[in-house]
Amino acid sequence: MKRLEGRTALVTGAARGIGLEIALAFAAEGAAVAVADLSQEDCAAAAADIAAKTGARTAGIALNVTSEADCERAVAETEKAFGKLDILVNNAGITKDGLVLRMKEADFDSVIAVNLKGSFLMAKAASRPMLKARAGRIINISSVVGQTGQAGQANYSASKAGLIGLTKSLAREFAPRQVLVNAVAPGFIRTRMTDGLKDEAKAKISEMIPLGRMGEPGEVAKAALFLAGDDSAYITGQVLAVNGGLYM
Ligand SMILES: NC(=O)c1ccc[n+]([C@@H]2O[C@H](COP(=O)([O-])OP(=O)(O)OC[C@H]3O[C@@H](n4cnc5c(N)ncnc54)[C@H](O)[C@@H]3O)[C@@H](O)[C@H]2O)c1
């Protein structure tokens, strides 16, 4: 029996990178998956690709997670396509790096808006059907820099630390209805977000990581899969680090 047979999931930022790997892993384990991202074209292409690879039911849903109306529509469209919503993964995220003295107010606001407020809006929209069903999983993709801080990423690390606080508050609020809320905190993972780093910087980062290398998106997806399935039934309000030992 596949681990997510009969479940339905909505993954934000799922057109590429870590989100795409999570959507693919869930579909491979039998879930019907809504692939939500900014561009309808990219969502449709990713949804078709996942369906072809896994045979799972998929849907592409364009949304901007900073819009409450978009978040509510995405949840409604997922319910319409698959009949219910069991699992939400808040994965959509952006960076606008810079040292604080040079960081523009707009760059602080936009990173908080997507990474933190967007996760709140999606959790709020998804919680309605989950609380009613007295079952559900919400998985927030935080980051190691939300735990350690990072020079040049005041906005991003604040958003990811905020996501940990949001995770714990949602976990406490929703626990009486058996809706479990956890976070995954990836370290340095090889995606477009880290592609921009120079080879020298990548080598330096790998030296700092006890396991001696950057992580793969599929390795983050496996942690999300664990938190989405029955094996994590007694786990809520936790932060699962997938960072090669970078932060312990
Ligand atoms: N790559 C890493 O090393 C790393 C480490 C820790 C945490 N993370 C987190 O993992 C998540 C995925 O990162 P990634 O490396 O795959 O990044 P990525 O840039 O490859 O993918 C992010 C996706 O989010 C989408 N997105 C951005 N803004 C959006 C919005 N307003 N509404 C809807 N979708 C939006 C993008 O279109 C993109 O498809 C992010 O939350 C990121 O902060 C990444």
Image (cartoon, rainbow, N blue to C red):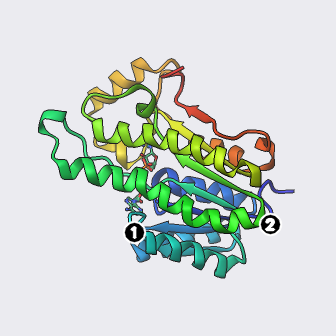
Q: Which residue, given by chain and number where applicable, does mark 1 sit on? A: 67
Instruction: Quadrant for residue 169, please give it.
Output: top right
Q: Which residue, given by chain and number where applicable, does mark 2 sit on? A: 6
Q: Single out the residue that lies furthest toward the bottom.
A: 80
Q: Residue at x 49, y 22 (%)?
A: 247
State the image coordinates of residue 136 (x, y, percent, origin top left).
72, 57
Determine whether the residue tagged by mark 2 lies in a helix, strand or loop.
loop
The C terminus sits in image quarter: top right
Q: Residue at x 32, y 29 (%)?
A: 150
Determine whether the residue tagged by mark 1 lies in a helix, strand or loop.
loop
Q: Single out the residue that lies furthest toward the right.
A: 1
Residue 48 appearing in the image:
no
Q: Residue at x 62, y 43 (%)?
A: 182
Residue 175 appearing in the image:
yes
Q: Number of callouts in the render?
A: 2
Q: Nearer the viewer, residue 73 or 8?
A: 73
Say what amino acid the circle numbered 2 marks: Gly
Q: Are circles 1 and 2 on residues that touch, CB within 8 Å?
A: no
Q: Would residue 75 be found to the left or right of residue 143 on screen?
A: right
State the image coordinates of residue 157 (x, y, percent, origin top left).
36, 36
| Ligand 1 under 8 Å from disc 1 Cβ | no
Q: Give the Cα separation between the discs numbered 1 and 2.
A: 29 Å
Instruction: Quadrant for residue 9, please give it.
Output: bottom right
Numbered tag placed on residue 144 in the rendering: none
Q: For the residues carrying marks 1 and 2, which lies nearer the camera in this image?
A: 1
